[in-house]
Image (tube, helix red, strand yellow):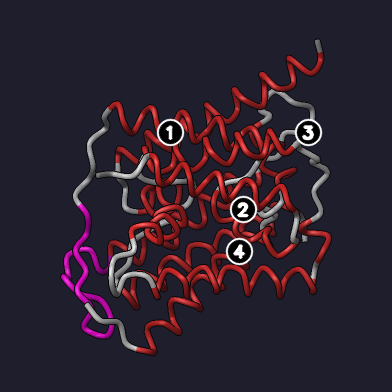
Amino acid sequence: MQLRKIQYVYIFLSAFLVSSGIVISGMVNPDKILRFLDFTGPEWDPSLLWVMLLAIMVFSTAFFAVKNKGSVLFNTPFRAPANSHINARLLLGALIFGAGWGLAGLCPAPALMRTILLDAGTFLFLALMFLGFYLAREK
Amino acid sequence: MSETHLAIFGGILVGLGFALLLLTSGKLAGVSGISAGLLERKRGDLRWRIVFIAGLLSASLLWYFLWPDRFASSQVPSYLRMAVAGFLTGFGARLARGCTSGHGVCGLGRASPSSLTATAIFVVSGGLMVFLIRYFYAT
């Protein structure tokens, strides 16, 4: 499916909104993530829960509006994915992902966004993240 | 505005971003899925991913000039820690087929049981890692 020029503009705008939300909510800062994950700590920060709750509410409104339509704007086909199975791959992957997340306080979006700070550690994180993507790819 | 208000506002923007992406291009994907797809080098499937990442970075750069404090982290992780964290994050996200945005926002937004499972494990595993790090640093 070939995308139209205007759709690329919207894709850019989508990412711009996501990124702005991550900055405004503070989730671009590993301090905030690590304070959330520090459940027994003295300064537990629940912000991430609010971010997720509101993001889920807004997104699900859009998702369920188009779920059974078979297409979205610009006559672009859309098929809602079937729910994937809860298997060993998912459980192990989630466990490993969480460990990495707790180790540096970074997940993929903030890590990409922090490249603008030109910090070597962030680039190292991303290089290894892509290596991880590659090694865990589905063949 | 309090941190809670900022988190709520930021969460709305994140949700709007993924909703806009879905409604205008039919794409239902989180940031790890979008960026990992770059490695597959499928014809005609690369440009939108690059445009999305460009959107993430552009907003990040703009916000950095408007509000640099939002990026200021007190973390000074070693290169080793960043490398290990990056690898675990990437490997785990691909194995679990999603990250904090893919499972945590888009997956939960479409009420997927496997995404709920993955997100719960992300948080428990991340929390455990933070707890262990603090325990070993204290002793």
Q: In this view, does B127 lie to the left or right of A31?
A: left
- Depth check, front residue: A132 or A112: A132
Disc 1: which residue? A94
Q: Where is residue A81 shown, x and y percent of the image?
A: 22, 54
Disc 4: which residue? A21
Q: Where is residue B78 shown, x and y percent of the image?
A: 76, 36
Calculate the distance from the C-alpha at mark 4 to the C-alpha at mark 3. Answer: 23 Å
At mark 2, the secondary structure is helix
Disc 3: which residue? A43
Residue under mark 4: which chain is it in?
A
Relative to residue A41, is residue A79 depicted above or below?
below
The quarter of the rendered structure image containing the C terminus of chain B is: top right
Residue type at mark 1 is Ala
* Quadrant housing residue A84: top left
Mark 2: few, some, or many residues within 10 Å (few <14, many ≥20)?
many
Residue type at mark 4 is Gly
Residue under mark 1: which chain is it in?
A
- Depth check, front residue: A129 or A60: A129
Mark nearest the camera among 3 and 1 is: 1
Mark nearest the camera among 1 and 2 is: 2
Q: In this view, does A78 lie to the left or right of B55?
A: left
- Part of the protein shown in magenta: A65-81
